[in-house]
Image (cartoon, helix red, strand yellow):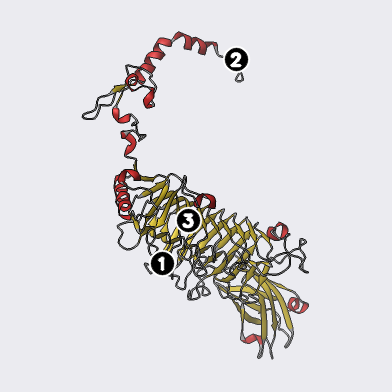
């Protein structure tokens, strides 16, 4: 008996009784027709090849086509050699001085046409303005992901700009026939530069992975515009950007590296993006004065790590402009007086407050992770973990805020949708600075909301309310309080209409109105939705002139 119970006698008998049939069937199924040798080639037996060539003799009678045999100098078999092209086989050699742009461009074009990968051996290659056509695939055999390795040329494929006024690699844009299915992987770019190391202007299904971009100051290391369905994986950026330019600019217009139009980016992922030692902001997304040129939708940052000195610039680590649906998942943001995230949607977007149903341009989701600010143990410094300046739509769930004066600061012009999970205050705000500046743990505010009653409804009185009737509403578009004062000679019936600034959807919504003082109860007040975003309050009984009638309201979508 085994783990599966006793063996079946009938099954054992079948296996023992039919070996000839089984072997014959297997032998037939494994019959192989030897591939024909190429013209001028003679198939060799494994015995003739011998172990010296890396092929141990298995059966002296079996022949192996020459095309499937590795060469003595270490090249791959000819049958698979078309899958990649070695840069050194195209007269491209490692050099810290010679400009090899022409040779590299020719090799890139050749490999893209053949559908092959262009592979570089470890070393330094000086190039500029390499235009990547569709299906280009540039790969190194080593990418230094530490400063120790970056300072050395050992085991690292390193590109340096031969002309600091030009990018090392360009995707799309002017003078290029296409921008899709391009891959860059496993190499380093290093040197101070006046232009981005890599400039992608347009691109569909572009993939960049295992890149180390170092010391591009003062220019950004990477500028990406008008990207769709692209993935950026394990990219590390250090010491790049300046006070004027983030280390990485994504779908952000207003830069001088052209073309001028930023266009829209759609559905892009950044996975394990690490940006450290940046002078200004680490990254901008959809940042610009004109949202037609600077806009990104459906962007995901998964486990990003942004870090810089606490004493550095007041610019936020992540500057967000005109976006729809930005998900920041499990981030680690550390240092800097400007906080972790700011939302700065362009002010010329006239539809922001006029309403777009449920399709507002805003929308940042902060999911988990840790934000460490600049409010040190001495109580000096001032840091908001998140600063919402202009736009709409912020959602935080389970993020830990440490050494921040305020977890989320909401400016007066920001939209109505700000939602912070209560768990944030429960376990995320226990390591702040005490009120007296001591370093012992102390809670800090979750929200510093400066909007006041900006999103409370306005009140328009109907004639039955009487001459000189007044009212005040406090709250926002979902809940709040109302105080109504009847004027001279009021009557029963419609008293006023509450108008909300934004219509959330085309159909009528439900409102709950509750009296909060005795006068409101006695007046028999009730409410009706008369059109989307507008609700009429009526009194069943005649109100008394000069009397306050108080209510609380709640909108139920």
- Give the image quarter of residue 227: bottom left
Q: Secondary structure at mark 3?
A: strand
Task: Classify 331 as above or below 474.
Answer: above
Mark 1 secondary-structure assignment: loop
Q: Tell me the SS state at disc 2.
A: loop
- Say which residue label 3 marks: 213
In the rendering, at what x and y percent does residue 552 appear? 70, 73
Q: Quadrant of residue 442?
A: bottom right
For label 1, count other residues whose C-alpha is less than 10 Å away and answer few (under 14), some (14-19) or many (20+): many
Is 420 rendered above or below residue 73? Answer: below
User: Could you tell which of marks 3 and 1 lies nearer the N-terminus?
Assistant: 3
- Say above or below: 394 vs 270: below
Task: Give percent across and percent down for residue 368.
Answer: 62, 55
Between circles 3 and 2, the one closer to the viewer is 3
From the image, tell me which residue sits under label 1. 262
Pointer 3 or 2: first along the chain: 2
Q: Residues within 10 Å of mark 3 (few under 14, many from 20)?
A: many
Q: Residue furthest front?
A: 97
- Marks 3 and 1, Cα distance to the nearest angstrom? 23 Å
Image coordinates of residue 28 in percent, x first then y, are 34, 18
Answer left or right for 497 relative to 125.
right
- On screen, residue 271 versus residue 438, left or right, reads left
> Which tag, 1 or 2, sits closer to the chain's start?
2
x and y, in percent, of residue 460 in the image: 60, 83
In-image side of 363 versus 424 (left or right) = left
Question: Which of labels 1 and 2 is toward the front?
Answer: 1
How far apart are labels 1 and 2 at the CA level? Answer: 71 Å
Residue 261 falls left or right of residue 508: left
Residue under numbered circle 2: 6
Judge whether residue 253 can be spotted in this image. Answer: yes
């Amino acid at each position: 008996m085994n783990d599966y119970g006793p063996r079946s006698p009938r099954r054992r008998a079948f296996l023992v009784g039919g070996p000839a049939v089984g072997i014959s069937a297997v032998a037939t199924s494994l019959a192989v027709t030897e591939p024909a040798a190429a013209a001028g080639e003679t198939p060799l037996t494994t015995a003739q090849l011998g172990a010296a060539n890396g092929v141990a003799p298995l059966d002296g009678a079996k022949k192996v086509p020459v095309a499937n045999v590795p060469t003595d100098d270490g090249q791959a078999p000819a049958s698979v050699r078309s899958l990649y092209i070695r840069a050194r086989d195209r007269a491209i050699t490692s050099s810290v001085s010679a400009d090899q742009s022409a040779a590299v461009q020719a090799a890139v074009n050749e490999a893209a046409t053949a559908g092959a990968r262009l592979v570089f051996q470890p070393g330094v290659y000086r190039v500029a303005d390499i235009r990547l056509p569709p299906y280009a695939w540039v790969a190194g055999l080593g990418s230094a992901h530490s400063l120790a390795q970056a300072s050395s040329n050992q085991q690292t494929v390193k590109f340096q700009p031969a002309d600091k006024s030009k990018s090392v690699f360009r995707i799309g844009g002017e003078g290029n026939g296409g921008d899709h299915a391009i891959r860059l992987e496993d190499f380093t770019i290093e040197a101070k530069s006046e232009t981005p190391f890599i400039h992608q202007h347009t691109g569909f299904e572009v993939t960049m992975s295992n890149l180390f971009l170092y010391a591009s100051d003062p220019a950004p290391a990477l500028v990406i515009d008008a990207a769709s369905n692209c993935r950026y994986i394990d990219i590390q950026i250090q010491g790049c950007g300046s006070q004027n330019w983030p280390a990485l600019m994504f779908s952000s217009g207003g830069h001088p590296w052209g073309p001028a139009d930023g266009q829209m980016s759609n559905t892009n992922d950044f996975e394990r993006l690490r940006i450290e030692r940046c002078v200004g902001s680490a990254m901008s997304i959809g940042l610009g004065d004109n949202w037609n040129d600077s806009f990104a939708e459906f962007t995901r940052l998964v486990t990003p790590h942004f870090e810089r000195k606490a004493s550095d610039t007041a610019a936020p680590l992540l500057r967000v402009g005109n976006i729809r649906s930005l998900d920041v998942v499990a981030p680690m943001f550390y240092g800097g007086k400007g906080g972790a995230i700011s939302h700065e949607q362009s002010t010329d977007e006239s539809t922001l407050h006029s309403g777009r149903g449920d399709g507002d341009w805003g929308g940042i989701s902060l999911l988990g992770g840790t934000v460490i600010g600049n409010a040190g143990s001495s109580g000096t410094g001032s840091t908001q973990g998140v600063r919402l300046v202009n736009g709409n739509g912020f959602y935080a769930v389970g993020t830990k805020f440490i050494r921040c004066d305020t977890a989320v600061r909401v400016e007066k012009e920001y939209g109505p949708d700000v939602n912070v999970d209560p768990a944030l205050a429960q376990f995320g705000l226990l390591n702040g600075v005490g009120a007296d500046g001591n370093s012992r743990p102390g809670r800090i505010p979750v929200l510093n909301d400066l909007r006041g009653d900006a999103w409370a409804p306005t009140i328009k009185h109907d004639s039955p309310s009487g001459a000189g009737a007044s009212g005040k509403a406090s709250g926002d578009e979902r809940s709040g309080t109302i105080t109504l004062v009847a004027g001279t000679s009021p009557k029963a019936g419609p008293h006023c209409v509450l108008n909300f600034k934004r219509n959330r959807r085309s159909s009528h919504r439900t409102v709950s109105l509750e009296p909060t003082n005795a006068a409101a109860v006695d007046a028999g007040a009730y409410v009706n939705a008369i059109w989307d975003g507008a609700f009429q309050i009526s009194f069943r009984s005649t109100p008394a002139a000069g009397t306050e009638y108080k209510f609380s309201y709640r909108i139920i979508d």
